[in-house]
Amino acid sequence: MKRLVLFFLFFILSIHDSVAQCAMCRAVLETEDGGVKAEAVNDGIVYLMIFPYLLVPLALYLSYRVYKSKKSTK
């Protein structure tokens, strides 16, 4: 279990730069000068994308604990 947690932490911390804009957002935001808004939108999308990746392992861990506790009570 410790190896899994360490792998997950390494995976999360190793993501440096992700491009998460859709084609429409990129086309609209690249027409502006400087691209500052495009970077801000990209950062916001990546920020919002992190939460599902955190919730899925949490749900799996909790279901594992419930399964293990039911198995040990039998």
Image (cartoon, grey):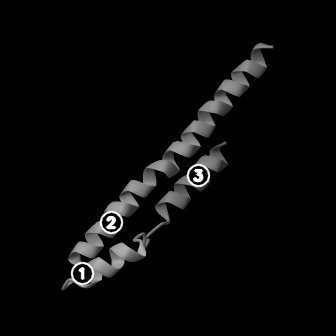
Comparing marks 2 and 3, which lies closer to the viewer?
Answer: 2
Comparing marks 1 and 3, which lies closer to the viewer?
Answer: 1
Q: Residue at x 53, y 54 (%)?
A: 9
In contact (CB < 8 Å): disc 2 and disc 3? no
In contact (CB < 8 Å): disc 1 and disc 3? no
Q: Amino acid at mark 3?
A: Leu
| 2 or 1: tag closer to the N-terminus | 1
Which image quarter holds the C terminus?
A: top right
Q: Relative to residue 39, is residue 66 drawn left or right?
A: right
| 2 or 3: tag closer to the N-terminus | 3
- List x then y, in percent, for residue 45: 37, 62
- The residue that disc 3 covers is 6
Q: CA distance from mark 2 to mark 1?
A: 12 Å
Q: Amino acid at mark 1?
A: Gly
Q: Report if residue 49 is visible in the image.
A: yes
Which is more toward the observer, 48 or 28?
28
Query: Outermost residue toward the right?
Result: 74
Classify 10 Å Cα crowding around label 3: few (below 14), some (14-19), many (20 and above).
few
- List x then y, in percent, for residue 57: 58, 44
Circle 1 sits in a helix, a strand or a loop, which is it? Answer: loop
- The residue that disc 2 covers is 43
- The residue that disc 1 covers is 35
